[in-house]
Image: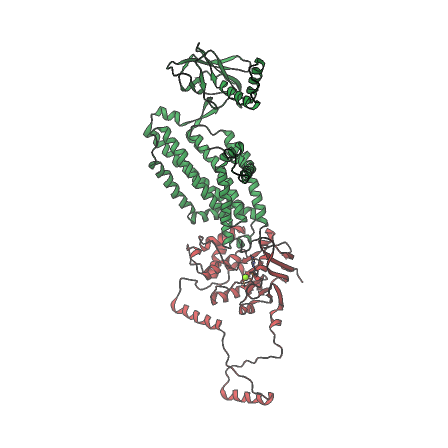
């Protein structure tokens, strides 16, 4: 097995007040190990320590105990940060910059040369559907629009490790869908993604492995397929069955099992339905002033 | 370097777009344009000069100082409060670069505003010149001068010698206490070294860093005994170390007030010499009293008023740079209001450093007996605190450079470069180092 991209051992963090008295135990004995190309989900209710774990991994907080290695180095090493893309929990961007300036600033700190920088920015803006905002300041953006800029910022350096703290919060279902697609395609390219969320559907769709935190302690951990398997429970899917055949089938099953099984029409999930409606609306009435149709995945990320 | 540049440009843009600079420019414009027009000067060019430099430019400096305080204190703390620092510090950026980049941006903006104020002040002064004065008066007033002061006299030594002589003469009564004897002797010594009777002479010793060159004047301020309108004849001499005369004035007559005597030709290459005034009146009762302190000084033209004001502005920028360093460091550790208080305290202490120095040197501020011992203790405690603060404030005490410019005194190289490099730079390095070290150790969570 290759070296893990990110590993933590027995990580612990307790927030203290001015007099060093413990105030909140945010993370306790967290041990993770992320392999290249893996999408890892941190799950947990509010205040369970997801964001704190991420800040520890980024070196923004100092652990009380335990060890963190990112690309085999300390997270506070500046070189390590060149390979990380981070989307914070709240996208507080500089309100007086426009989208392009904001991305330019981030790119400059990554030392990306100007020509490459402009190219990447154009593609990222296209990708998150904000290329038309021109000189509008980020301060005027809606929450979801700002969130999309945050996401573009996190990807501008074509990072090997992408850390996303609640990436879909504030996003519309289209944005959510796209973020999930981006995460999957990043993973296919061998990038490692660590994301936190309490939106279970999102996590379920994209994560290979998850860990459920509660009170800062890992309560469950493993590959998502294994965790979600229900023993002795099977599902049968049938298409286009006429009423006569259906009755025959039910009778047959009743004879075999000794009890008549439940039969329900198949439903699409709300996400699929929503996506269909919006797609149709777009065809009918063109563009609106918020986000527009999201583009393809940025070329430099493909 | 790219990171530094990015931070610098980004922060400058932030301050410009948040209208800090615009707001300041409007305030300064109001101050520099409207204030002098609404105040009435005494109608002379000298008065206008004083008003423009000391008051308008002085107030502009205070305004810019407060802007510097706010901008530097908020440079990092505002990002903490808005949870933006988390993102910035997740980027490959050293915290020292963040600190230095933003400090540079703040100080660039402040210095620019200060130099713009200086420019406007100069513009207004040149307009005043056209309005008020003859070209000749303008030419003298708009020149700055070097002042060369004689060595301070050791009054203690003089007083002791005086007592010794009086003792030998046997003219000291036994019942006089040593303390009051010394006080009288000191007063005597001071009087003797600032006054000269008819037929007598008085010396001042000069020890200069650089040999005399160029043009030189003697500037003497004095008073005379009696109310006679008659003028006293007197003469001036410059003697070298060996007591040889190198220059002597024609016989001069002096009334009351100030005289301005050209030294021509100048005795070149002298660094150590004695200036002697001889009272040529045959009557010993005709006494001339020189103003104590700076009654006699040598004056050399140094440079234009414009240059002098710009030098003073540069010196003030140095002070602002220090203020900004303190603001940055405080803002990197504390929340914005706390950082502002801390920095404002320093600014106020700096402004009050003269008063503090006096409080420390003159001791208790209470007159007579303290009402009770607690008050007395409190007083001692205050003085003790001042004493502790003074060594920190001493390097910041550069007097009042704008007042100096208004009086036409050249901001010397020693004051300008000495303060910038020998006093401010080490202090800046210390503040920056402490600030950056503590900031680097700081956790960046949402709460501050
Ligand atoms: N800066 C801080 N100072 C003190 N306590 C903190 C701080 N940040 C977080 N905590 C505490 O640590 C615990 C975990 O917080 P954290 O933000 O990691 O939760 P989370 O899982 O991200 O929650 P959410 O889903 O709401 O984002 C909480 O009890 C919180 O109050
Ligand atoms: Mg969180």
How is the protein colored in the picture? by chain
Position of residue A268 relative to residue A161, above or below, is: below
Residue A80 location in percent, x, y?
A: 60, 54
Q: How many marks?
A: 0
Residue B131 location in percent, x, y?
A: 32, 30
Q: For residue A79, say whether it is visible.
A: yes
Which residue is at a point 51% across and 55% down the rendered structure image?
B83
Residue B267 location in percent, x, y?
A: 49, 16
Quadrant position of the N terminus of chain B in the picture: top right
Name the outermost residue toward the front: B175
Q: Nearer the viewer, residue A23 or B132?
A: A23
The quarter holding residue A3 reads: bottom right
The quarter holding residue B287 reads: top left
Position of residue B303 relative to residue B78, above or below, is: above
Position of residue B35 relative to residue B232, above or below, is: below
- Ligand 1, by image quadrant, is bottom right
Specify the chain shown as green: B
Name the outermost residue toward the left: B131
Which residue is at a point 37% across and 38% down the rendered structure image?
B32
Q: Nearer the viewer, residue B360 or B414?
A: B360
Residue B262 location in percent, x, y?
A: 43, 18
Q: For residue B154, say whether it is visible.
A: no
Position of residue B426 relative to residue B158, above or below, is: below
Specify the chain shown as red: A
The quarter holding residue A131 reads: bottom left
Name the outermost residue toward the right: A1
Q: Nearer the viewer, residue A100 or A211?
A: A211
């Amino acid at each position: 097995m290759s070296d893990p991209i990110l590993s933590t051992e027995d990580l612990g963090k307790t927030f203290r007040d001015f007099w060093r008295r413990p105030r909140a135990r945010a993370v306790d004995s967290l041990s993770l190990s992320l392999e290249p190309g893996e999408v890892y989900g941190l799950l947990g209710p509010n205040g369970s320590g997801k964001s704190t774990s991420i800040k520890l991994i980024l070196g923004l907080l100092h652990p009380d105990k335990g060890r963190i290695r990112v690309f085999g180095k300390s997270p506070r090493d500046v070189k390590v940060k060149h390979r990380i893309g981070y989307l914070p929990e709240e996208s507080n961007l500089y309100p007086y910059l426009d989208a392009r300036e904001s991305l330019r600033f981030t790119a400059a700190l990554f030392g990306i040369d100007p020509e490459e920088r402009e190219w990447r920015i154009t593609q990222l803006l296209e990708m998150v559907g904000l290329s038309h905002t021109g000189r509008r300041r980020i301060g005027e953006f809606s929450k979801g629009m700002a969130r999309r800029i945050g996401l573009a910022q996190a990807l501008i350096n074509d990072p090997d490790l992408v850390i996303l703290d609640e990436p879909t919060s504030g996003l519309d279902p289209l944005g959510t869908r796209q973020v999930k697609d981006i995460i999957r395609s990043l993973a296919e390219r061998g990038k490692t993604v660590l994301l936190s969320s309490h939106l279970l559907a999102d996590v379920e769709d994209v994560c290979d492995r998850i860990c459920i935190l509660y009170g800062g302690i890992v309560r469950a951990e493993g590959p998502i397929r294994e965790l979600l398997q229900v023993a002795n429970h099977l599902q049968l899917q049938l298409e286009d069955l006429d009423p006569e055949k259906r009755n025959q089938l039910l009778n047959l099953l009743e004879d075999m099992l000794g009890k008549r099984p439940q039969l329900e029409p198949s439903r699409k999930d709300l996400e699929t339905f929503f996506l269909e409606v919006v797609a149709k609306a777009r065809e009918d009435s063109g563009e609106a002033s918020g986000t527009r149709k999201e583009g393809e995945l940025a070329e430099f990320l493909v | 370097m790219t990171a530094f540049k990015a931070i610098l440009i980004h922060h400058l843009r932030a301050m410009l777009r948040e209208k800090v600079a615009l707001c300041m420019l409007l305030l300064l414009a109001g101050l520099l344009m409207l204030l002098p027009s609404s105040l009435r000067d005494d109608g002379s060019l000298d008065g206008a000069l004083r008003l423009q430099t000391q008051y308008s430019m002085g107030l502009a400096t205070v305004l810019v100082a407060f802007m510097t305080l706010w901008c530097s204190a908020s440079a990092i703390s505002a990002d903490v409060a808005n949870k933006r620092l988390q993102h910035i510090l997740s980027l490959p950026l050293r915290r020292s670069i963040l600190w230095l980049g933003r400090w540079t941006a703040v100080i660039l903006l402040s210095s620019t505003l200060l130099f713009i104020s200086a420019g406007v002040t100069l513009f207004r002064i040149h307009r005043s010149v056209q309005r008020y004065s003859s070209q000749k008066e303008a030419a003298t007033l708009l020149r700055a001068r070097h002042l060369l002061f004689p060595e301070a006299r050791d009054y203690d030594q003089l007083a002791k010698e005086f007592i010794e002589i009086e003792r030998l003469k046997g003219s000291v009564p036994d019942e006089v206490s040593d303390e009051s004897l010394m006080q009288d002797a000191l007063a005597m010594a001071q009087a003797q070294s600032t006054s000269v009777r008819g037929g007598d002479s008085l010396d001042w010793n000069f020890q200069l860093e650089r040999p005399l060159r160029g043009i030189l004047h003697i500037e003497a301020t004095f008073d005379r005994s009696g109310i006679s309108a008659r003028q006293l004849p007197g003469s001036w001499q410059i003697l070298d170390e060996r007591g040889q005369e190198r220059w002597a004035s024609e016989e001069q007559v002096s009334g009351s007030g100030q005289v301005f005597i050209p030294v021509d030709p100048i005795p070149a290459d002298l660094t150590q010499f004695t200036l002697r005034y001889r009272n040529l009146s045959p009557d010993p009762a005709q006494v001339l009293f020189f103003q104590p302190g700076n009654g006699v000084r040598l004056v050399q033209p140094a440079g234009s008023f414009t240059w002098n004001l710009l030098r003073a502005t540069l010196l003030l920028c140095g002070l602002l740079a220090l203020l900004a360093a303190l603001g940055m460091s405080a803002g990197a550790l504390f929340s914005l209001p706390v950082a502002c208080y801390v920095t404002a305290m320093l600014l106020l202490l700096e402004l009050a450093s003269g008063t503090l120095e006096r409080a420390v040197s003159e001791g208790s501020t209470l007159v007579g007996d303290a009402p009770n011992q607690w008050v007395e203790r409190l007083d001692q405690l205050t003085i003790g605190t001042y004493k502790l603060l003074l060594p920190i404030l001493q390097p910041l005490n550069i007097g009042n450079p704008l007042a100096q410019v208004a009086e036409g005194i050249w901001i010397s190289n020693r004051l300008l470069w000495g303060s910038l490099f020998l006093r401010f730079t080490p202090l800046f390095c210390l503040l920056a180092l402490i600030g950056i070290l503590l900031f680097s150790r700081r956790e960046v969570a949402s709460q501050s």
